[in-house]
Image: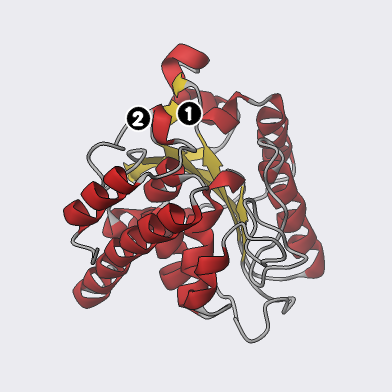
Amino acid sequence: MKLPVEEKARLEKLCHQFRIDLIETLHQRQTGHPGGSLSVLEILTTLYFTQMDVDPANPKKPDRDRLVLGKGHAAPALYRVLAEKGFFPVEEMATLRCLDSRLQGHPNPLDTPGVEITSGPLGIGLSAALGMALAMKLDGLDKRVYCVLGDGEINEGTIWEGLMAAVKFKADNLCAILDWNGVQLDGVTEDIMPMHNIPERFASFGWHVIQCDGHDIEALYEALETAKTVKGVPTIILAHTVKGKGVSFMEGKNAWHGKAIDDASYEQAMKELGGVL
């Protein structure tokens, strides 16, 4: 099934607005992670608006799909999408990382509606998502678990333990998505810890591998729809993305992993995005 043209255009417009809003929020708060938040927006938007069965009025309903944001530092992007979905007011984004706010620097399920698990220590998300997927099978729930991973995160050994276990237990209701932007905190991933032949690595562990453009809503939709048809093994979507997508001077730059947005950078970014200064 194809994504309707009108829906594709609507979601692309949403992602553009999300970029403007994230720049505004992160500049206002002078904290947060712009690079990885901008790179993952289409992934999260496609998941929440075309795939996932979730209910903002009943965030903990048992028969829901679940998302684990392994790369928890991209919480600003997750929060903005959750707000648009109706889990809390969009205006609450202004409280990001404030004392007593529900929107802390990394996701917290105790405080934030729509968040499934605390994620911050990289590497724990995939195994947690696997546990959720297996519990669903035991409970007879025909729902799916999605886990969004980061480039630096797949350096962690726990990721590969989770990959092995997911194949052993035939977790075909688990779909991982790699936000494959090629950059991590300290530099380019191939310089920090070369992984070499990433598609072949995942395939060698027994996962079904799909590659797509991680900023193309339609390509992501088709990849996610295909993943639902795969039986007996879990699927990973390798989504080719750009760190800092949409802001020229942030794109592909590790310096913008967690750098505060100063006034000059804010003004330039808003001009590029067409935001209101």
Task: Provide residue 186's location: percent of width, then percent of height.
Answer: 49, 22
Instruction: Using the rendered view, name the quadrant where residue 67 is placed.
Output: bottom right
Q: Give the total number of marks visible in the rendering.
A: 2
The reply to whether residue 50 is in sight is: yes
Say whether marks 1 and 2 touch (CB < 8 Å): no
Residue at 78% across, 65% down? 110
Task: Provide residue 63's location: percent of width, then percent of height.
Answer: 69, 76
Is label 2 in a helix, a strand or a loop?
Answer: loop
Mark 1 against mark 2, which lies toward the viewer? Answer: 2
Name the residue tied to disc 2: 253
Name the residue nearer the viewer: 172 or 256: 256
Q: Is residue 221 left or right of residue 48?
A: left
The CA distance from mark 1 to mark 2 is 9 Å
Is label 1 in a helix, a strand or a loop?
Answer: strand
Name the residue nearer the viewer: 267 or 225: 267
Name the residue tied to disc 1: 184
Q: Is residue 191 left or right of residue 58?
A: left
- On screen, residue 59 above or below 46: below
Name the residue nearer the viewer: 232 or 35: 35
Instruction: Using the rendered view, name the quadrant where residue 60 is placed.
Output: bottom right
Q: Is residue 177 left or right of residue 134?
A: left
> Could you tell me the amino acid type at mark 2?
Lys
> Could you tell me the amino acid type at mark 1?
Gln
